[in-house]
Structure formats: structure tokens, C-alpha cells
Image (cartoon, helix red, strand yellow):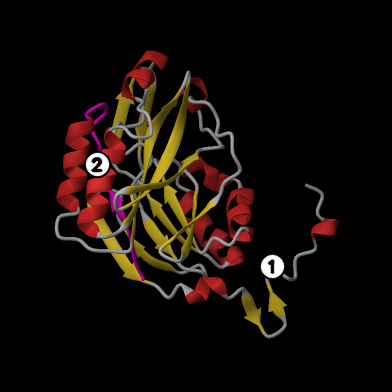
Amino acid sequence: MKIGYVQTNPLFGEKDTNFEQVNGLLEGMKADLLVLPELFATGYAFISKTEVESLAEEIDGPTFQFLKKQSQKTEAVLIGGFAERDGDKIYNSAMIVSKNKLIGVYRKIHLYYKEKEWFSPGNKTPEVFNVKGVNIGVMICFDWFFPETIRTLALQGSEIIAHPSNLVLPYCQKAMQTRCLVNRVYAITSNRIGREKRGNDDFIFTGGSQITSYNGEILSSSQNNDINVAFVEIDIEKARDKHLNPYNNIFEDRRPEFYKL
């Protein structure tokens, strides 16, 4: 199975320009699964609720139309972040698109910093999407900070974690090695690069997109100034086997009756 990420440097508020950047990066590419960054079409550093509302879109909006075309072109399942409008609420969401179909939408449940001013928190338990016979779980950026997120997805059978991100802290990439190891899942962290200085905030995005294996190895990673696409071939069966040895299965060995959560 061929999986990958796209690392971009979006211009704030310039959806068409950002779509074109991704379109150029994916020219001639083929894969089974590709992950794009959080809010890849809009940028991140909103300064007002009005601004968020002007850039938010419904599920069948421009981002879906773009991802649908790219999915057809690359023959891949595509997962990318967008500002989702649903009635009077706006969510920091990611959509899963395969060919002509919207497979599902995940709404970020752990909002970071001023996201709490602009977005409503996700209102559903993270779910697993079965696409092309593979179980894919989705989380967004700061969700990584809470190990319960990946564990919830892994216990539901997720084999790959798609992780659209706009990371500004330096810790996630190392933490994902542990997250993958203790759940025996693959993860695709798609981050962005660049700087957004708007209002009173100055965000410097860390890049460092990476694909992490079920045993915590980094299979591919990018630098903090790369605008690129990266792929690896994986054996999905490795993420389906939860045995560490003949005696230990990481899920069968759990003792939830002793966990006070």
C-alpha cells in the first residue's frame, strides 16, 4: 500500500492559489492514501469571527470539489483540513474523499489556543472509516497531545492514523513515534511550513511532516522549509497484528477494570 503526505506553504485566505500549489505538487502522482495539512486551503491565523465565517464552507463546497478532482487524478483517498460551516457553527474539520464520493468528515475535538474563539469543538467520538478495505482514523493537529485520541481510534480498529496538522510546537513528531508504537498503527502527519503574522499573533509552522510505522520508526520525513510530497510503501498487515510476542497482545493485555479514567 502506497501512502503519503503533502507539505505546503499556504497563503492566508487565498484558496485558489493554495489549491493550485497542491495541484502542482500532485501532478503525475499516484498513491492509495494522501494526507494534506489542517486548513490547507485557507491558512490558519484568523483574526476575527467574521474572517472565519467568510472563509468557511459547507461540506460540498470548493474544498470538496478540489479534493474530488485530485482523488480522481491520483487514484488516492485524500484527506485534508477545512473550515466547515454547519448551520450557525463552524468546525475545524477534515474530509475524507475517494474518487467521486465524500466518505466522511471529522471535526477536531481538542481546539488549540484561539481556535476556541473561532471554532466549535467537535461533537462526535472520533470514528474509523473503512476505505478500500483499510481502516483509517482521523485526528487533527493538537488532538495528538491527548493519547486517548489515538487509543480510541486504535480500539475501533484503525490501522492508519491520518493527521492533518498546522504544528507550531516542536514536540509532536517525537510523540507520534510513541503513539504509533503503543497502538501498533501507522500515522501520516501532514504539516505545513511558513509564517503567519497577523493581529497580535506570530505563528511559525514547524514542517517536519512524517510517516511513522507501527513500531515507532520514522519511514519518511520532511524538513521545515520543504514544499513537497513524500510516499512510502507499507505492509498494512503489520498494523493488524497486535502481538508483541507469543505471550503479549497489546489490546488483549489491557486491564481496563483497573484504569480510572
Q: Nearer the viewer, residue 196 or 25?
A: 25
Q: Decide whether residue 12 is among the magenta residues.
A: yes
The amino acid type found where label 2 is placed reads Phe
Q: Decide whether residue 165 is among the magenta residues.
A: no
Where is residue 58? Give x, y as percent: 37, 29
Structural crowding at the residue carrying mark 2, measured as other residues with C-alpha within 10 Å and reported as few (<14), some (14–19) or many (≥20): some
Among the 4 quarters of the image, the one containing residue 13? top left
- Give the magenta part as a residue range: 1-14
Q: Residue furthest bottom?
A: 246
Where is residue 72? Give x, y as percent: 23, 54
Residue occupying image coordinates x 30% and y 31%: 42
Q: Is residue 34 left or right of residue 145?
A: left
Circle 2 is placed at which residue position?
Answer: 66
Residue occupying image coordinates x 59% and y 49%: 149
In the rendered image of this protein, does residue 213 appear above or below residue 245? above
The amino acid type found where label 1 is placed reads Phe
**Label located before the other in sequence (1 or 2):** 2
Structural crowding at the residue carrying mark 1, measured as other residues with C-alpha within 10 Å and reported as few (<14), some (14–19) or many (≥20): some
Task: Label 1: state its secondary structure.
Answer: loop
Circles 1 and 2: CB atoms closer than 8 Å: no
Among the 4 quarters of the image, the one containing residue 81? top left
Task: Label 2: state its secondary structure.
Answer: helix
Q: Is residue 139 left or right of residue 125?
A: left
Circle 1 is placed at which residue position?
Answer: 251
